[in-house]
Amino acid sequence: MTDKIKQDKINKAVWEACDTFRGTVDGAIYKDYVLTMLFLKYISDVWQDHYDGYKEEYGDEPALISEMMKTERFLLPESANFYTLHKNRNKAGNGERIDKALHAIEEENIAKLRDVFQDISFNSNKLGEESQKNELLKDLLEDFAKEDLNLRPSRIGDLDIIGNAYEFLIKNFAADAGRKAGEFYTPPEVSTLMAQIVAPKEGDEICDPTCGSGSLLMKCGKRIQLENNGSKKYALYGQESIGSTWALAKMNMFLHGEDNHRIEWGDTIRNPKLLDGDDSLKHFDVVVANPPFSLEKWGITTAEDDKFSRFRRGIPPKTKGDYAFILHMIEVMKPKTGRMAVVAPHGVLFRASSEGKIRQKLIEENLLDTVIGLPEKLFYGTGIPAAILILKKNKSDKKVLFIDASREFSSGKNQNQLSEDNIAKIIETYKNRATVDKYAYLATPKELAENDYNLNIPRYVDTFEEEEEIDLMAVRVEREALKAELAELEVKMDGYLKELGYME
């Protein structure tokens, strides 16, 4: 057995595989090809590793080996194996061969992979004319055939190393993707913060109705594992409207060993897919989301006649869908255990009209628990600061906690980050549920009403720092001392200039 590889070596190798496309194909396009190839390579290496192990043990019984391989997590036809594709890489038709392989894999694993590859075609003209496309795909196959990307379990060991590499790629693609990045990725430290806030437990059903690539959902699952000796007694549910991003989420789940998931493809507002058998919305213990900020075309035309009555508290503005997602999330919380955390732009805290009325009802129904103001430049694709709203179905009091965490972060060139200390302080303040000078304020229902249910954080958390009084006499003394020092330096300077012959 070879020495087990380190995470950063895998990450470096998969990132270098992207060089095949850089300068030729746009990053928003090639990310799907690289991520899909990583998935194909991994399941091929697992298959080959197990096959070779059985062959070593039962070499003269091919029928027995064949039967044992039928119990694999993913079934892999020989024609669809990465190594078959790599062997034929110098022939014409790489794109067509890879597409056929993906189709064959989907057919053999239809329950797990139905439609996962339908939005990706390696035979697409997005990769250029036939000769260029064939050359690009030959290079990609060669990149993934390198020893650094030998992903056999006997070499890699921990499954998470592959999932982490996949997550590393998604994060780097998000950093490069500008405005589009928010569609598929939530910064990991924000996901960590949200997972700690909602405190998922064993047995919980957890949902993200705008799940992107699934990272926030999996952070909640990982939290349960960390606190319960690796227990996987929970279920993950998600819905994603963009087909290619939905496929990323499915592959991401499998690469992290999260087989107990149900990720649906469709528009959560217009066509929610996570239903109970009787055509009513399924309810969850934990609901988390980072929905698109102020989505313009969110589905107002169907909201008035919504058969699930999600908008009975009011219909959000035509061009701002933030409360559409918030109201949906409230509707799918379980009556007793339900708790949710949602990322939203600050406008949801103070905009008037229909949003003001919805906000008032959420407060009067005692659903709103906490408002956390986050730093600017934290999210991919937008520099604006956002907030996390925590709502609960079964609150312990009638107050609302405001936390202003906007001024404490690690600054970066393009992206700011929350450090571990920043996150720990937010969590501690959230748990203590008490006023902290210049950082947090626990507001009563009366105070909220007096502010017309405006939740703008500076109304509650006073961060004003008084400037120290200036001692004018001390300043005058310091000024006189500086003048004397300057006069002394000028005398010295004149001396130097005379020595050098510049003055007589």
Image (tube, rainbow, N blue to C red):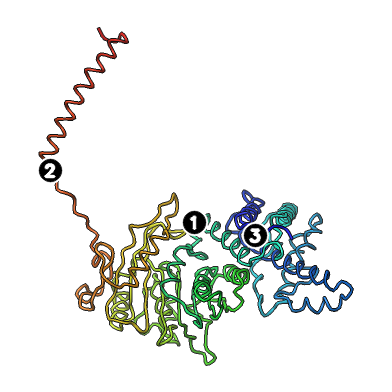
**Which residue is situated farthest in the left direction here?**
473
Going 62% across and 50% down the picture, which residue do you hit?
22
- Side of 464 where 315 appears, left or right: right
Q: CA distance from mark 1 to mark 3?
A: 19 Å
Mark 2 lies on residue: 471
| SS assignment at label 2 | loop
First reached walking from the N terminus: tag 2 or tag 1:
1
Q: Nearer the viewer, mark 3 or mark 2?
A: 2
Mark 1 crowdedness (10 Å alpha carbons): few <14, some 14-19, many ≥20:
few
Mark 1 lies on residue: 178
Q: Quadrant of the C terminus?
A: top left
Residue 34 got which mark? Answer: 3
Q: Quadrant of the N terminus?
A: bottom right
| SS assignment at label 1 | helix
The kind of residue on which mark 2 rests is Asp
The image quarter in which residue 342 lies: bottom left
Going 49% across and 76% down the picture, which residue do you hit?
209
Q: Position of residue 39 (x, y in %)?
A: 67, 65
Vertical side of 194 occupied by 23: above or below = above
The kind of residue on which mark 1 rests is Gly
Q: CA distance from mark 3 to mark 2?
A: 64 Å
First reached walking from the N terminus: tag 3 or tag 2:
3
Q: CA distance from mark 2 to mark 1?
A: 49 Å
Q: Position of residue 258 (x, y in %)?
A: 59, 74
**Which residue is situated farthest in the right direction here?**
60
The kind of residue on which mark 3 rests is Val
